[in-house]
Structure formats: C-alpha cells, structure tokens
Image (spheres, helix red, strand yellow):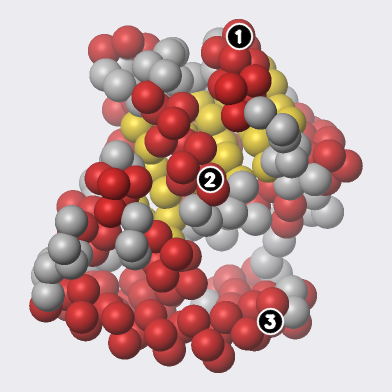
C-alpha cells in the first residue's frame, strides 16, 4: 500500500489527538503535523514520499474520498476538514475554552486581518499570539517569529504542498509547538464570514457544488484531477510505490 494511503488508514481520531495535545506538557513529545487531503491534493502529495513520512496524521476533507477510503481501507474513514463544517469548529471552540496559544499564517494581508478580527469577535478567550499573511519572503524569519510568540498550535494555509513542507520544516525545529494543522483556503474563506458554507449546503454534502460557483478553478479540478485520483487510487492500494 502507498505510504499516503497507509497514513490515512492509520491516522487517529482527530478530536482525541487534539485533546491529548492539550493535556500534555509542551516538550514531552515532538511537534505533530496534521494535514488534510482531497482528490486534488492527494495527487500533489502522491510522489512526495519523504515529506509524507514526516506527517503524523493525514485526513480526507472530501466526502467522495472518505467514502472510497472507507470502502477499501478496512476502516471507517470520516470526512475531516479544517473548516467550520468540520474540525475547525472543534479546534476553535477548544482553543477558546482552554485559552490555547495559536499562530495563524495564510491568505493575503488584508484577508488575514479580517479573519483574525472575526476569530477575536467569536472566540475572545483564544490566545492569538501571532498571525501573518502567506506571502512571506523567508521561512526562517517566520519560524523565528513563531518561536518568539510562544505558540503551541500553528494553523497554516499555504496550499498543498507548500503548507505541508512548511509544517514539516517547523516540526524539525523542535520548539514549543505541539501541533501544526494545515488548513488550505480556510483563512481566505473566513475573511468574509465565519461560516463559509450555508447550512443547507453542508447538510446535503454539496460543498463541492457551492465551491464550483464560488471559485472558478474548482470545476477544472472536478473534471480533470478528480477522475485521475480515482484511477491512481487503485494502483496505490494494490501496488506499493517505490520509495
């Protein structure tokens, strides 16, 4: 089985993983990197074996791939996404409840400012120790700012695979960060409102259709990359990819 599929199969319950991190000492365990893939980002990570090995948990954020994985991986694989229809809501509520130290990075400069204002309005007890847009010049400078901030949780929305590479490099710094979550376009989406998807869209699992009309590039992915994913999935399932 491909290392990417094996990571998806072995990934622990995401809420329990967060709960364990909250109640452990900072330095008792190295930084955990948690990322999310859909059929499009699966294709982007598929050949990055070394990168994938350093990611601690990989969840699927598309209902189509969740159903496919559940059918063939021998376990129920739920849809988990870092957005308000899924795990982001859980994380932000826990961050507010426990006053977690969180650093956000991603989106454009004007977008991240709006997103942080929305977070502060809705989760006033969350300790936002730093934030910045995703168009930085130096990763090392960002790592330094994160370390100085004392952040224990980093939410990173730089797009696949850049966000995954960033997260793994931050993990190697072995600082006080407990967990790094990738979040794709979440910080961009939240700059206009906290709940990106209308309730009825989420209820009927029509997020993909909503995004087709909201983001023009999504249709191209659905027509091109998604069929590619369903083809390579069976190759990855039955034939181990060379390391």
How many marks overall? 3
Q: Residues within 10 Å of mark 2 (few under 14, many from 20)?
A: many
Measuring from the top left, give residue 102's x and y in whole percent.
58, 25
Which residue lies at the image location 40% right of the left edge and 66% below the top edge?
42
* Contact (Cβ within 8 Å) of mark 1 with mark 2: no
Give the mark, 1 or 2, whose residue is nearer the N terminus.
1
Q: CA distance from mark 3 to mark 1?
A: 40 Å
Which residue lies at the image location 38% right of the left edge and 80% below the top edge?
229
* Contact (Cβ within 8 Å) of mark 3 with mark 2: no
Numbered badge on residue 134: none
Measuring from the top left, give residue 228's x and y in whole percent.
40, 85
Measuring from the top left, give residue 169's x and y in whole percent.
44, 31
Numbered badge on residue 212: 3
Task: Tell which of 186 and 203 is nearer to you.
Answer: 186
Which residue lies at the image location 64% right of the left edge and 85% below the top edge?
219
Q: Of helix, strand and loop, which one carries label 1?
A: helix
Q: CA distance from mark 1 to mark 2?
A: 20 Å
- Where, by quadrant of the figure, is residue 138 drawn? top right
Which residue was labeled with disc 2? 163
Q: CA distance from mark 3 to mark 2?
A: 23 Å
Which residue was labeled with disc 1? 148
* Contact (Cβ within 8 Å) of mark 3 with mark 1: no
Q: Residues within 10 Å of mark 3 (few under 14, many from 20)?
A: some
| 197 vs 132: above or below | below
């Amino acid at each position: 089985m491909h290392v990417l599929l094996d990571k998806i199969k072995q990934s622990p319950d995401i809420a329990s993983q967060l709960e364990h991190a909250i109640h452990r000492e900072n330095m008792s365990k190295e930084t955990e990197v948690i990322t999310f893939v859909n059929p499009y980002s699966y294709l982007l990570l598929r050949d990055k074996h070394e990168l994938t090995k350093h990611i601690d948990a990989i969840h699927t954020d598309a209902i189509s791939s969740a159903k496919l994985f559940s059918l063939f991986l021998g376990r129920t694989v739920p849809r988990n996404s870092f957005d308000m229809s899924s795990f982001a809501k859980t994380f932000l509520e826990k961050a507010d409840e426990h006053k977690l130290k969180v650093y956000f990075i991603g989106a454009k400069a004007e977008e991240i400012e709006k997103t942080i204002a929305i977070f502060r309005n809705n989760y006033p007890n969350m300790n936002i120790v730093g934030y910045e847009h995703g168009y930085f010049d130096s990763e090392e400078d960002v790592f330094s700012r994160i370390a100085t901030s004392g952040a224990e949780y980093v939410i990173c929305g730089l797009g696949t695979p850049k966000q995954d590479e960033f997260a793994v490099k931050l993990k190697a710094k072995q600082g006080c960060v407990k967990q790094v979550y990738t979040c794709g376009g979440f910080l961009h989406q939240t700059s206009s409102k906290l709940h990106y998807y209308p309730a009825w869209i989420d209820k009927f699992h029509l997020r993909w259709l909503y995004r087709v009309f909201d983001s023009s590039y999504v249709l191209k992915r659905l027509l091109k990359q998604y069929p590619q994913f369903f083809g390579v999935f069976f190759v990855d399932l039955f034939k181990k990819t060379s390391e």
